[in-house]
Amino acid sequence: MPRAFADITFTPSVKAAQELYGSREANRGFELAENPRNELTDAEVQFIEMRDSFYQATVGENGWPYVQHRGGPIGFLKVIDSRTIGFADFRGNRQYISVGNINADDRISLILMDYPGRHRLKIWGRARVVHEQDQPEIIAALENPEYRARIERAFLITVEAFEWNCPQHIVPRYTKEQVQTMIEPLVTENENLKAQLQLLLSQQRDN
């Protein structure tokens, strides 16, 4: 039983490229694996629910791919079950390219990044658009009351495959909050040293 991602992506032309560049034998192991990796485990669930953004790709009716950045508060991409993830679609520039693409072709790919930890998770799936008037319970389950953004619809994605990438070439990047957490001990130490210096100077003046 092949890994689900290999079953999806290792087309004849991809296999020919692997043969050309000498990696065909190394990649053949993915086609002989026992675990298809099409059901999310605890590791994937925890990783997904800690993301505050991801990249998604859809394909238009003219065959052109479209890659879009999606962002929100940590946890806005939610795991419904081992084969389903979803997120609320916040109002944006109102071009609706991804929505239109999915309405014509439900295939979708996601790349989730952990830049500080240098981890990357790729997900292949099939998406559908959900509107509040049709399924309000899904919208309610995916919204975050603390994030004040207008929800226009939701995306539900059935996971067909996933694969972790190696950390090679992932340049670490940090959010403002992560930087603040990292430097907080230094800021505290600096404040303590300044307080000690002020006390020492005061004692010298008193003497």
Image: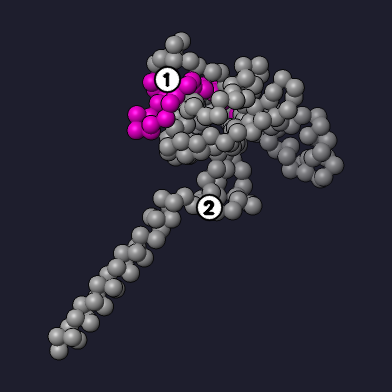
Circle number at residue 205: none
Instruction: Depth check: give the residue in front, 201 or 78.
Output: 201
Instruction: Depth check: give the residue in front, 15 or 74.
Output: 74
Instruction: Depth check: give the residue in front, 70 or 205.
Output: 205
Q: Amino acid at mark 2?
A: Arg
Mark 2–mark 1 Cα distance, whole angstroms, equals 32 Å
Neighbours of disc 2 within 10 Å: few (<14), some (14-19), many (20+): few
Neighbours of disc 1 within 10 Å: few (<14), some (14-19), many (20+): many
Choose top left, top right, bottom left or bottom right for residue 68: top right
Q: Position of residue 134 (x, y in %)?
A: 46, 10
Q: Is residue 40 left or right of residue 11?
A: left
- Give me the residue at 47% from left, 39% from top: 52
Whether residue 103 can be seen here: yes
Q: Amino acid at mark 1?
A: Ile
Q: Is residue 19 left or right of residue 195?
A: right
Mark 2 or 1, nearer chain start? 1
Q: Is residue 1 above or below residue 177?
A: above
- Give me the residue at 34% from left, 29% from top: 145
Q: Position of residue 195 (x, y in %)?
A: 24, 72
SS of the residue under disc 2: loop
Q: Is residue 147 magenta?
A: yes
Q: Which residue is mark 1?
A: 139
Choose top left, top right, bottom left or bottom right for residue 105: top right
- Give me the residue at 82% from left, 38% from top: 17
Q: Which residue is mark 2?
A: 173
